Image (cartoon, rainbow, N blue to C red):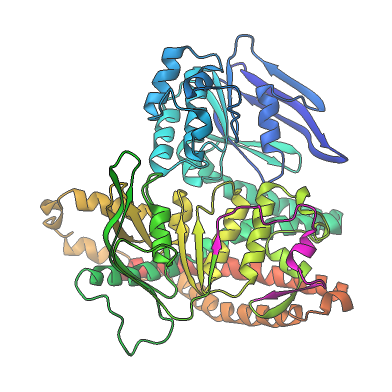
Amino acid sequence: MAAPLLALRDIRVVFADQVLVSGASFALAPGDRLCLVGRNGSGKSTLLRIAAGLVDADGGEVFRQPGTRVAYLEQAPDFGGAARVIDYAMAGGAEEHKAAAALDELKLSPSADPATLSGGEGRKAALARVLAEEPDIILLDEPTNHLDLPSIEWLEERLSQFRGAFVLISHDRAFLRRLAAGCLWLDRGIVRRLDKGFGAFDEWSEKILAEEEVTAHKLDRLIAQETQWSREGISARRTRNQGRLRRLHALRKERANRVQQTGRVELAAESGQSSGALVVEAKNVTKIWPQPDGSERVAVRDFSTRIMRGDKIGLIGPNGAGKTTLLKILTGALQPDSGSVRLGTNLTPIYIDQSRASLDPEASLWDTLCEGGGDQVMVRGKPRHVVSYLRDFLFRESQARQPVKALSGGEQCRLLLARALAKPSNLLVLDEPTNDLDMDTLDLLQEMLWDYDGTVLLVSHDRDFLDRVVTSVIALDGEGRAEEFPGGYSDYLRQRKENATPARKDAAAAPSPPRTERAKTQTKLSYKDARALEELQRRMPELETEISEVEKVLADPDLYARDADLFHKSTERHDALKAELVAAEERWLELEMKREELEGG
């Protein structure tokens, strides 16, 4: 095994009186391509800064091979002291021609003033600086934040060709699956290593948590509760979301039928349509922005769509392509230059852009949700105890009285979601909601959107998130063209490729397999699988009924104050039933898809 270029041994980090990292160790060898993952606030960025030599640990040691060049991409680059972008790009030690070449790849002007850069342009400048140094090791902290899809794909290609080693922190699952050959998991102060790609991380980490949960139950009830909260609050959500893919496919098929009809029929709503079924009807909308030099920029031209109640629409495209403009047009916040937009009746929208400015840093989580005092949160017109509601958003009971300023960025985003989603609404508008979110919060947001019974319009550059959430994608190319594709981001790529490439006629003419060969093919489930499917179909409604009964108990707004022990026991029972339902749904989905495949074949 090659000697490590960089090694951290028994790293210890203490903030105030809280031990954040305790005994964390890992080594980075030549050619290593690792991702550093962990819950928000676990110390990932701190550990990366220690590895980069920017801050000192409270204990432990950092080893770096002599002569090893390390470049660090921070989340918020500091442009202070740089009059031009080229000056900033050279500040890491790169030669001017190399810095200029990197900026050219990213289409940034070397003479631009760094103070005028947008968030995405600032991230590109920081990437140019890191890459121009030609280091042996690159440490990247959320490199895809504020980048558009073309830039993310460019960065994937650039890093895949990088000959050195790198460690990256990212919430972008598609990005991690493409690049990471190993995983470092920072969990409760220590680092575990998996020498497999990110695609294997969820199963591996959940297995570890499950094993710890069994041990914890034998040792200490409090530890058991924390482990169960960690596992049920995060990994079970991922499993539940996988189990909903079947429903998502059905919704996408329904959306596809409507999208295909849009180009053939008038977009007027039928007079007999039930109130509120139509959310947005846009016909031939165009918006053109005049530019300072006298030219014009077409944001969108001649675009039509009909959005119905329950649709979940994602808007994608390069930065500056007009996504936010179209979003404002579709919600009535901006008038088009031509064409028409008709909004449905009784719309109650909520806008979420993940700006945390509206949070009072000195207020507690409890007071933030119970703005009028007391211990109740009105959630869609029904009272919930604030502690019970906070659990839905992955907060522990002990955090309820903490000030907002003590929360990490991802935790503050969860609190914003909790406050926003408690309000009555039937239309959610989200402009790049996944920026700066950790994976746990992304899982939570994904589940919230699935459970949301209204309509969703969102702008996002997160491909995995789009694949898991939306029923349709509207793609803008930056030159005024906007086109709708049923399905998620992967469906969009496939359809775009199919539209650009003529169908191969020889595929359609391929001979069918011989009759004798077809006769040997299995056409139905085995007896064992059929019985299992039948049992699951019986058990799942029973579980849903039991869960509903427990939820009725927990819905009592005075339960926590009157009988805290019953509240905790009911909560544990609710979690256990949910976990059993998750496993049943997952197995049912697997068997049902197998049955359809066999019978369809």
Residue 572 can be seen, yes or no = no
Identify the residue at image location x=39%, y=20%.
Answer: 101
Q: Nearer the viewer, residue 227 or 214?
A: 227
Left or right: 484 as drawn, with respect to 7: left
Residue 443 occupies quadrant: bottom right
Q: How many marks?
A: 0
Camera-side residue: 394 or 60? 394
On the rendered structure, is 192 left or right of 447? right
Q: Nearer the viewer, residue 420 or 50?
A: 420
In this rendering, the answer to whether 488 lies above or below 304 is above
- Main secondary-structure element of the magenta-colored stretch: loop
Return the x and y of residue 510 as percentages of the image width and height: 13, 55
Judged from this view, the residue extending furthest toward the bottom is: 272
The residue lying at 25 percent from left, 70 percent from top is: 262
Question: Residue at point 38% right, 40% down?
Answer: 150
Q: Is residue 470 left or right of residue 256?
A: right
Name the image quarter holding the C terminus.
bottom left
Q: Quadrant of residue 487?
A: bottom left
Q: Quadrant of residue 452?
A: bottom right
Residue 550: percent from left, percent from top: 72, 79
Q: Nearer the viewer, residue 551 or 601?
A: 551
Q: State which region is magenta.
A: 351-379
Q: What percent of the width, then of the height, locates residue 565?
A: 87, 72
**In percent of the image, x 57 and y 81: which residue is there?**
541
Q: Which quadrant of the rendered structure holds the N terminus?
A: top right
Residue 264 versus residue 548 in the image, above or below: above
Q: Is 368 a magenta residue?
A: yes
